[in-house]
Structure formats: structure tokens, C-alpha cells
Image (cartoon, helix red, strand yellow):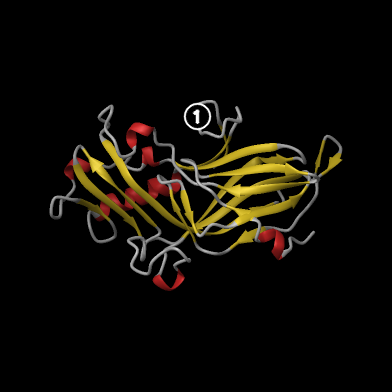
Amino acid sequence: MKTSRNNIKKLMIALALLLGVACTGLGSDWLVQVLGGTDLQSTEIGNGLTNPENIFDEAKVSLNGFKFSQFERCSLEEEGEELVLVEDFEYSEHLVFDLLKKTVTPEVDSIQFPQKIKICKFSFKLDQLSAAEAPEGIDSDDELIGSSALIKGEHNGTPFVVRIDLDQNIELNSSAGMNFTSGEEVDVFLIFELSKLFLGVDLDTLALTSGTIYIDSNDNTSAYTQVRSNLISNIKLVRDENSNGKFDSNDVAIAQ
């Protein structure tokens, strides 16, 4: 069954602190929303109530090429009931997620798929944003231009700026598959684990420029390689097991 352009333009993206996918049954169909955020606790975002080592003040990513796929690892039958086979859905426009402010630019609608399908792969691209590709609502001189991710904060009171200038296709796979059924409401969060961003990196030993720790392709390059790897390797799809709309300890990773 071919997904129409009208259905493609129904992709609604809104932000919570969590980058995720919410699927809501509607009649014989279900809808998908892509949401955005991180695994950070409130005390790790712009305040020091518990004096954490790292405080995050800004976290933006440029993404495109969202794709939901059924592929050969998916069984077409479950308990004797045939699942609907649909073509891959892809949304290729650039979207800028502000993971901490819970916004996405530009706002788009939601997509719609037939009832009862099994998704085994969710893929997207972490994409370096050029001024020419900047979506409506993002200025040509926005700080994110030229980068695919921009993360700012403080480490023990010292400012840090992480700038990723990488184009990277990312696939999250589930060998068991993710089933969605008509009338069912499910939240599935796509989590960027910023709490693991600095694994293997000693920020106290990095060079400072004008009192700031810059981590990018020109500054502290060894740390940049590690941080870039940490960002990409610590993304996972998590099912909202208790249906509270929030990422918490009750939720289970279903793809990574």
C-alpha cells in the first residue's frame, strides 16, 4: 500500500524532554509523532540544585530522512494473523530539535499508517545544516548552521561548547519488531543520552580558549572524536511502559 503525500504531511512533531515516537490509534489507522529530548534529569539542565558536575544549557540537533521500515527480518504473521505490509515511509525535510526547550522547527503534521503493522527499523540522519538548507524559522546566521549538533553548558563552572559537524545515517533495529495495532495508543521515545556524552573524556584536562572548553573538529580533537562517538552510540528507542508520557526507570529499550 502506498503512503499518500497527504498522509506524509500529517507528521506532527512536538517536543517533550524526550525525543520519541507516539503512536495513537484512530479508527482503523494509527498516527505517528516524532518527539525530541534527552535522558537528562532536571538538575542537569541549566541549574545546580544538586551541584552536578555538568550542567547543560543548550542542546540542538539537525535531523532529516526519518524512515519507518518493515524489512525481511519481520515476520509477516503473528499468531496466525497476517500483518499489513506497507512501503517505507520517509520524511526528508530538515528539522531542528531543541532538546531542552521542547521545540521543533518547523512544526509539521503527523503520518498515518494502516492498522496492525510491525516496524523493525527506525532510521534518520544526523545532518550538518547549511544556511541554504535551514528550515523556515531558523535564521541563516543561527549558531547551529554548519553543524549537525550544538551542545552548550558548564563543567564545574567552566563553559563548554560541543559542535558536531557530521553527516551520519543512524539505524535503530529491533529483532523482535515493534507492533502497532488499531485503537492502541503507544509512546516510543527516541532518546539522546546526553548523560553519557563525556564518557572517556576528562574535561578537566582539555585546552581552554578564552576560558571556554571548545570540543569540535578543530579544538580538542581527540575529545571531539570520543564525544561524537558517544553521541551516536547512545541513542535508543524506548517504549513508555506505564503510559505516563515521560521517560523514566519503568520504560524499556526496544531498539538501539
Above or below, 140 relative to 65? below
Residue at the image position 68 percent from the left and 46 percent from the top: 119
- SS label for mark 1: loop
Residue 156 is situated, as x and y percent measured from the top left of the image, at: 20, 37
The reply, left or right, for residue 214 in relation to residue 239 is: left
Identify the residue at the far left of this view.
Answer: 210
Please give left or right for residue 111 compared with residue 210 in the image: right
Identify whether 48 is placed above or below 127: above
Q: Position of residue 148 (x, y in %)?
A: 40, 59
Q: Please say whether residue 175 is visible from this viewpoint.
A: yes
The residue type indicated by label 1 comes to Asp
Residue at the spot x=54%, y=55% of the render? 124
Q: How many marks?
A: 1
Q: Nearer the viewer, residue 230 or 181?
A: 181
Q: Residues within 10 Å of mark 1 (few under 14, many from 20)?
A: some
Q: Quadrant of the C terminus?
A: top right
Residue occupying the point 51% across, 58% down: 125
Residue furthest bottom in the image: 132
Q: Can I make out residue 71 in this image?
A: no
Name the residue tied to disc 1: 248
- The x, y position of residue 15, in whole percent, is 50, 46
Q: From the top left corner, tell me how far across and down residue 71 is, in percent.
A: 70, 52
Q: Quadrant of the N terminus?
A: bottom right
